[in-house]
Amino acid sequence: MKKNLIVFSIATFVTLLSFETKSPKSYDVPPSGYSGAPTQSRTCRNCHSSYALNTAGGSIAAIGLPTTYVPGQAYNFKIVITNAVSRGVWGFEIKAVDMSNAAVGTFSSTNPNTTVGSGELKHNLAVASTGTTYTYDNLKWTAPTGTMSPVSFYFTGVAGDNDGSEFSDYVYSNTLLNVTLPVTLAEFTAVTRNNAVFLRWNTYTEINSKQFEIERSIDGDNFENIKTVASVANSSTVRQYDYVDQNLPKQPQLYYRLKQVDIDGKYWYSKILLVRLSDKGFSIDNVYPKPASRVTHVAIYSDKITKAALSIIDMNGKVVIQESVSLNKGNNLVDVNCMRLAKGAYVLKLQNETGESVIDKLIKQ
């Protein structure tokens, strides 16, 4: 009886040892940070390590990603993984980063075999499919709207044998580096001098660029084109542009932006610059968000410590909100509760103790 017990224990140990050797840890959904992007510098090969990265006979490609991008535009693409030897399961990860290696843009997909996490698009349960190639389609990357930085894409694919382990799987990686805007804007500045506004902007690169349209606004919302400046079309060196706006309207401040237009008609806007034409008096510099929701933030400049009446007036001339606000010298930010406002357009009026008044518009969502 004792002898049988010892034999049973050895057999059980051997069985357990055999199970652990054949079935190492694996993931249904891949962990984040294995696309080969900088800072992590890891690929799927950190787990699937039987063969060298990019072993001859296979590849991964991202077809449809842009070589230059337009801010806010969506680009449909697909990931194609190939291998000379027939494989049984396929997976991938892709990430887009800016010059600081931060994730940039937005990935999305209607492909049920994909998921988004930690700034990456990747497979959601690796797809079992026998053959020498597999394509993940219906993938999308939407370009950022708030950056001028070149974007780089890093992507990694796995061509596995579908044995339930991470052994004998091939891993391929690829990159698409320094995808830029058609025009990479280095800087855009505005300086007041002698009753004029001096505008200057520099570009790092220009690809099929047609022109810059200088737009001006008195309220930060409605812009008009005041000058069109031809661009050099194509350049890989720093280019400088200047314009002096001398025909200034009588306003306490003005807003400027650039509209860059490509040869094919596509266009994008620069950031908006606020130029204060006088340090006297007071002004409403900004009202946001636009449209307003629960709370509206009103940025106000005042040349002295004072009190002012802030009014919100509907299109029938009725004052629906009125508050007294205390202003410090310099920049101020006042929050206005707009929850009781009905949806629609309003006038926001600010009047100080000496009777000076300024207005802006407010849209309630």
Image (spheres, rainbow, N blue to C red):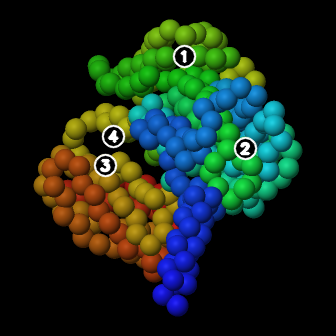
Q: Quadrant of residue 113?
A: bottom right
Amino acid on which the number 2 mark rests in the picture: Ala
Q: Which mark is residue 205?
A: 1
Q: Residue at x 64, y 12 (%)?
A: 233
Q: Nearer the viewer, mark 4 or mark 1?
A: 1
* Disc on the earlier residue, 1 or 2: 2
| Neighbourhood count class around disc 2 (C-alpha, 10 Å): few under 14, some 14–19, many 20 upward | many
* Disc on the earlier residue, 2 or 3: 2
Amino acid on which the number 3 mark rests in the picture: Ser
Q: Residue at x 38, y 20 (%)?
A: 198
State the SS at label 2: strand
* Disc on the earlier residue, 4 or 1: 1
Q: Is residue 302 above or below residue 313?
A: above
| Neighbourhood count class around disc 4 (C-alpha, 10 Å): few under 14, some 14–19, many 20 upward | some
Amino acid on which the number 1 mark rests in the picture: Thr
- Image position, residue 168 (x, y; %): 67, 44
Q: Are marks 3 and 4 in contact (CB under 8 Å)?
A: yes
State the SS at label 4: loop
CA distance for labels 2 and 3: 62 Å
CA distance for labels 3 and 4: 7 Å
Q: Which mark is residue 252?
A: 4
Q: Are marks 2 and 3 in contact (CB under 8 Å)?
A: no
Q: Residue at x 33, y 40 (%)?
A: 252
Front residue of this view, candidates 221 and 179: 179
CA distance for labels 4 and 1: 35 Å
- Image position, residue 333 (x, y; %): 28, 58
Q: Is residue 230 visible?
A: no
